[in-house]
Image (cartoon, rainbow, N blue to C red):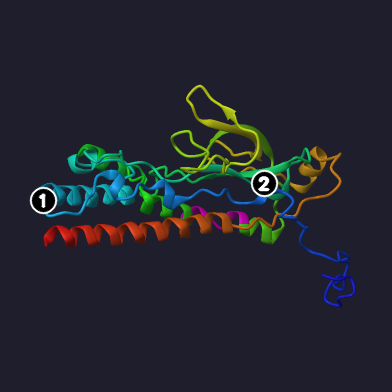
Amino acid sequence: MSSTDPTVGSGGNETRTEILPKVDMDSDPGFALPGYDFQAAVPGPASIGVRRDDSLGSVVDAARGVAYYVDMVGFGAASNPLSAGAAQPVKLVGINYFLKTNIKCPNNEPMYRYIEGVPQGTVFGKYVRDELAKVGLPPLKGLAPGMMEDVKAGLDPNDFLRSAFGDSYPDCTYVELPVGDAYGSITNPGESEPYIKGETIKGADGKHYQRRWVQKTDAKGNPVFLSKEEYDALAAKAKDTPIAAESFADVNEEALRRASLVMGLAFFALGAWLYKRK
């Protein structure tokens, strides 16, 4: 936006020629989404034992395939003997990672947002989880509940409202949290280049971890903000006051990727079920 634009810097005491900070997405990979391949994370029909012939065994295998993909979509774990008997275990799909924002912490360090892409099984609350457990079913951590968790996080209006009304001075804390999938991998199947960028630390549990500055939360999990005076006092050595303009495209894009995979698995399950009925 040019400083000669008559719509900028002409309102009262407003002297800024540009409202939003410039962010060079190409030069800083911290702003980019990880190149996690949802499709590659889901085993294909042949790899879980589904085959096509005229034997009774193939019918059983087709039924097992239906049960397997239903559990992938719903539970993220085997919920019945059919899916438990597949050639590969039912797995959680998704990754956790840090995404850089254009906000600075009071110490002038870049603030990151921790994205929990591995389904947590919390979208329907504790009551549903406990009721499922009573009948021996696992928590709802499949692709569909994970997609709903992504959408719920992406539609949270709190950060947007604080940005819109100017109350966006975060307090930060330094954390070490797991990144990659639920099983410790940070590469797609058949690839050697990690989709998680930056240095990682290998934990004793076999998972990878990263350390980043994130927004501090209170005992109830609510983000902690400072007044401008408190922030300025902590940021005495900082050159610029950050403007909160974080985009939620990261969360919404992940939800769309989950949705497309859910639809594909649903069509496969329907096709296998129809084939079994022949």
Residue found at x 17% / y 60%: 275
205 and 234: which is toward the camera: 205
Q: Percent from the top left, x then y, of residue 227? A: 74, 46
| Residue range (magenta) | 152-159
Give the quarter of the image for residue 134: top left
Q: Main secondary structure of the magenta part?
A: helix
- Residue 50 is at least partly visible in this image: yes
* Image location of residue 113, percent across then percent down: 61, 45
Q: Measured from the top left, where is residue 236 in percent x and y?
A: 85, 40
In the image, 85: left or right of 260? left
Q: Quadrant of the N terminus?
A: bottom right
- For label 2, count other residues whose C-alpha is less than 10 Å away and answer few (under 14), some (14-19) or many (20+): some
Q: Amino acid at mark 2?
A: Gly
Q: Name the foreground residue: 82 vs 154.
A: 82
Queried whether the magenta region covers residue 156, the answer comes back as yes
Rendered position, 69 above or below 267: above
Tell me: 251 left or right of 228. Answer: left
Tell me which label, 2 or 1, sits earlier in the chain: 2
Residue drawn 47% across and 60% down? Answer: 256
Residue under circle 2?
30
Residue behind mark 1? 55
